[in-house]
Image (spheres, grey):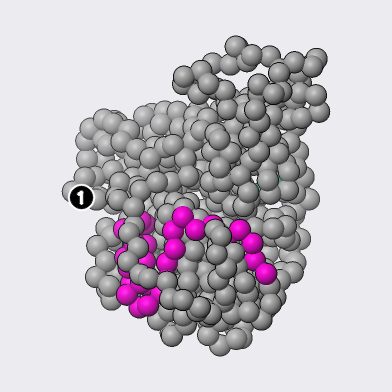
Amino acid sequence: MKRDGIQQSLWQQIPAFEIKNILPANTVFDVLIVGGGITGLSTALQLQKIGKKCLLAEAHVIGYGSTGGTTAHLNTLLDNYYNRLEKNFGEDSAQLVAQITRESIELIKSNIEEYQIDCDFVEQAGYLYAENEEQVKELEEIFEASNRAGLQVRWVTDIPVPFPFLKAMIVEGQASFHPTKYIYALAKAFEDAGGILLQQSRVVSVDDGEIIKATINEDIYSAYNLIYATHVPPGVNLLHFRCAPYRSYALALKLSNEDYPAAQVYDMQDPFHYFRTHITNEEKFLIVGGGDHKTGHEENTEACFKRLESYCRSHYDIKEVAYKWSSQYFEPTDGLPYIGQLPGNGENVFVATGFSGNGITLGVASSIILTGMIETGMSGEYAELFDPSRIKMVAGFNNFVKESADVLGQLIGKILPGEKLPSFSDLAHNEARVVKHDGHTLAIYKDNNGELHALNAACTHIKCNVAWNNAEQSWDCPCHGSRFSIDGEVLTAPARKDMEVIDLRKES
Ligand code: FES
């Protein structure tokens, strides 16, 4: 199956999902779900099971976005630790967060049992370890807060990875699985229950109202409710200023020995590293992740893989780097995701985003919350806690917004003087550059045959300039995370329109 970059994840090594269902004529659906990742499919299946008529539209193929590029950790211990959640939201709220993460893992387990899903699911403990005194201090706070939130934690004197440490804790009740095998089974169950699934179907416009009219490719579909399960929603919304896009890197390694950990392990560096073992089709892999940075803020993304690999080689005997891939997630300003009614839209338009690095667990949590809201028409305590309209101005908010905007100029190369565009003969094959020329900013890539691909560098969402991602050969927007191919095709929302192609012969 395909994903949104040139690198191959371990989870892509299966054929694309084949749709079996037939679209009924003139249907007004109860719910239109946009996005075929874990959030969209999990929500669609839950709603279809309680009797709602659902249509799910995916712009590419299911699993194309972050679900196909995750490392598939199912956690109750989240990236935004409980000491920070307690500080921002209070002890009761931290307990609610722990509770919904447990419910999410339980829902996955019950789906696996009900639909007999073969998806390499294993339950494991997680370890978090500190390597210096400052980290020890925070680890002690995390331990206490996690304990108060209801997690089963205890101190340990050993960790299952070969890195030196000062102090470590273990938390029970974590799990992992093969994410695309799992969502394929959800997609099949959704179709078997009467749901309608569309692939290669981009929602290009939406008219709000009691009955929502959505144009998907060139056809119009009607629904009473709409859910954006696309990370940040399209258009311009409050959430674009409360979520920042990040890239994360992963390797699937084969070791020369049997040093694979039978657990999930996390260090506390910034950005942190994480480790787990995955066995699929009788092959064993050490999956390592890390190297996260804000989208568009790293000039050489290929170097992120190199750094991650050399960090692993410093302590592991690596036989082979079997797969390497990167993916995108959205960091919320205050540490909690935004799940519920989309601000500035009708009461029948919903969103789920800002999952930080816990997209699988919180995507499933979203399906529980959104199904409850649509089924009952009411919000419960989860919906109040994760309300996308909440205002939580935590420390660092202003920098958060400013940093996203600041990147615009920083990766732009030379400003080209004169009237003529140069031939870019100094650009190597498979290299790219953003240049200014006579008031225009151009994104230029030279392919392996020496052919130039030129685009107007303005992202089609709200016109920030894109930056080159050499590891995935894509143009990435630092503002809200839209991504485009070398020929300007949209790979990742919120942009809905392809970038403008520039004919260099006319420009020169
Ligand atoms: Fe918003 Fe590019 S994603 S301007």
Q: Quadrant of residue 102?
A: bottom left
Quadrant location, the C terminus: top right
Q: Is residue 426 magenta?
A: no
Label 1 crowd bin: few (<14), some (14–19), many (20+), radius 10 Å: few
Q: Nearer the viewer, residue 297 or 35?
A: 35
**Res. 198 in view:** yes
Secondary structure at numbered mark 1? loop
Can you tell which quarter of the image residue 286 is in? top left
307 is higher (above) or lower (below) than 258: above
Q: Is residue 186 magenta?
A: yes
Q: In which quarter of the image is residue 120?
A: bottom left
- Label count reads 1
In the rendered image, the residue lying farthest to the left is: 282
The residue that appears at 55% across and 49% down in the rendered structure is 492
Residue at (54% x, 58% y) in the render: 217
Image coordinates of residue 377 in percent, x first then y, are 60, 86
Question: Which percent across, then down, holds residue 303?
Answer: 50, 28
- Tell me the amino acid under the disc marked 1: Asn
Left or right of 342? Residue 180 is left
Q: What is the x, y in percent for residue 485?
A: 54, 38
At 80% from the left and 15% from the top, the residue drawn is: 418
Q: Which residue lies furthest to the top in this view?
A: 425
Instruction: Say which of 143 and 123 sits in front.
Output: 123
| Residue in view at x 26 percent, y 40 percent | 259
Residue with the most extreme bottom position: 376
367 vs 500: above or below:
below
Q: Name the residue under label 1.
A: 281
User: Which span of residues is magenta-colored?
Assistant: 179-207
**Residue 101, above or below 162:** below
Q: Is residue 497 left or right of residue 267?
A: right
